[in-house]
Image (cartoon, rainbow, N blue to C red):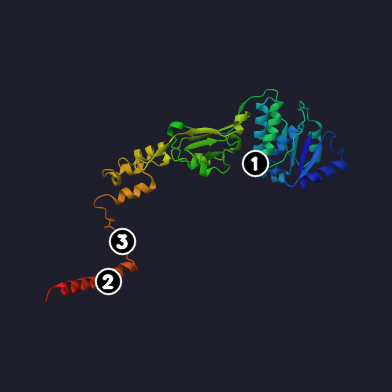
Amino acid sequence: MLLIHDTGHGEQMIDVLARAGAGLPARVLPFAVNEVSQVGLEALLGAVAYGAARVLLLADPRKADETEGLAGQIELAEAVLGGLGYDGGRLEILNEADPDTVAARLTGLSPRAEIPRASFLALGGKREAINLALRHLHQHAPAPVDHLALPAGAPFGAVEVRIDGCTLCLSCVGACPMAALKDNPDKPQLSFTEASCVQCGLCQATCPEKVMALAPRLNFTDAARRAQVVKEEEPFECIRCGKPFAARSTIEKIQEKLAGNPMFSQPGALDRLKMCEDCRVVDMMEEPNQPLAHKERPLPRTTDDYLREREEPRQQAREIEEARNKKPH
């Protein structure tokens, strides 16, 4: 068993048990941290994966209000272990100030079924450590499943998109902090990597069409680690120059929303929505009675033009003089 404690209250409690009592049971391994409330899912699941039959967290009862987040992490970890078929009660918080009560609790703990010890190195960030522990626990689970539903608020899951309402505006791609949602620079396309999603909900809040929903779960299949195409379509081509410039569903949605707008009531105004940014400006300037239109731009004048204009009267005078000299006297 693993006893996680802080360097203040927990360490003092263990010292008291060693000096005035029988000390920690031989099967209990103490592990000191700065603050017990900072222990996360990666440590809890990692300890179980490495063979800890139980993980107890010795917290200071004077700071009981600070362990709410830790209790949530334990609840989530127990849900994962229970969903994979492991017996429950492997994780527990001890908010005790009495050394005798702690000693009695540690001594009276019932054993749990052993789990084959993991051999992986917990390298990388927290997310990588959690994924390594989950992979080991799933591999040796009494009742392995491909998909495990989790309670709301869990940092794992999928994003369900109602395809018929998605316009591929890609607002969700810009909002996703984990790059779980990605676009394709070569064509209108939205892809999703489930293993990277933390269920923050920013994509759901940002989506202008409100077609996204969170589905908290664990996906143990290989597909969760690969980018899966959610929606793709051919780009919309400019009706004037033929250049692809937007997603077809986006243009159709904009036309639908602006069909009754007075700003687009004039003939041909809605057609500009089907043009690229360059052709749209050209079409507006070619419109009759355009207030911003002007006459044809004059050609720039150079020094040669001025010299030629100065020489023309002189040439005409010379021609007149030559014609006068040719007349008979």
Under circle 2, the secondary element is helix
| Left or right placement of residue 201 versus residue 328 in this view | right
Would you place residue 161 above or below residue 15 in this image?
above
Residue 9: x %, y % from top left: 77, 46
Residue 275: x %, y % from top left: 36, 43
Residue 41 in sight: no
Closest to the observer, 170 or 260: 170
- What is the tally of numbered marks visible in this picture? 3
**Of callouts 1 and 2, which one flags the residue occurring earlier in the amino acid sequence?**
1
Residue located beneath label 2 in the image: 311
Tell me if mark 2 has few (under 14), some (14-19) or many (20+) residues whose alpha carbon lies within 10 angstroms of its own. few
Closest to the observer, 166 or 312: 312
Disc sitting over residue 299 in the figure: 3
> How far is mark 1 from mark 2, CA to CA?
92 Å
Would you place residue 325 above or below residue 156 in this image?
below
Residue 99: x %, y % from top left: 81, 40
**Of callouts 3 and 2, which one flags the residue occurring earlier in the amino acid sequence?**
3
| Left or right placement of residue 127 versus residue 259 in this view | right
Residue at image location 61% in from the left, 33% down from the top: 225
> How far is mark 1 from mark 3, CA to CA?
74 Å
From the viewer's perspective, is the residue at label 1 or at label 3 nearer? 3
Task: Give the quadrant of the C terminus.
Answer: bottom left
Residue located beneath label 1 in the image: 69
> How far is mark 3 from mark 2, CA to CA?
20 Å
Under circle 1, the secondary element is helix
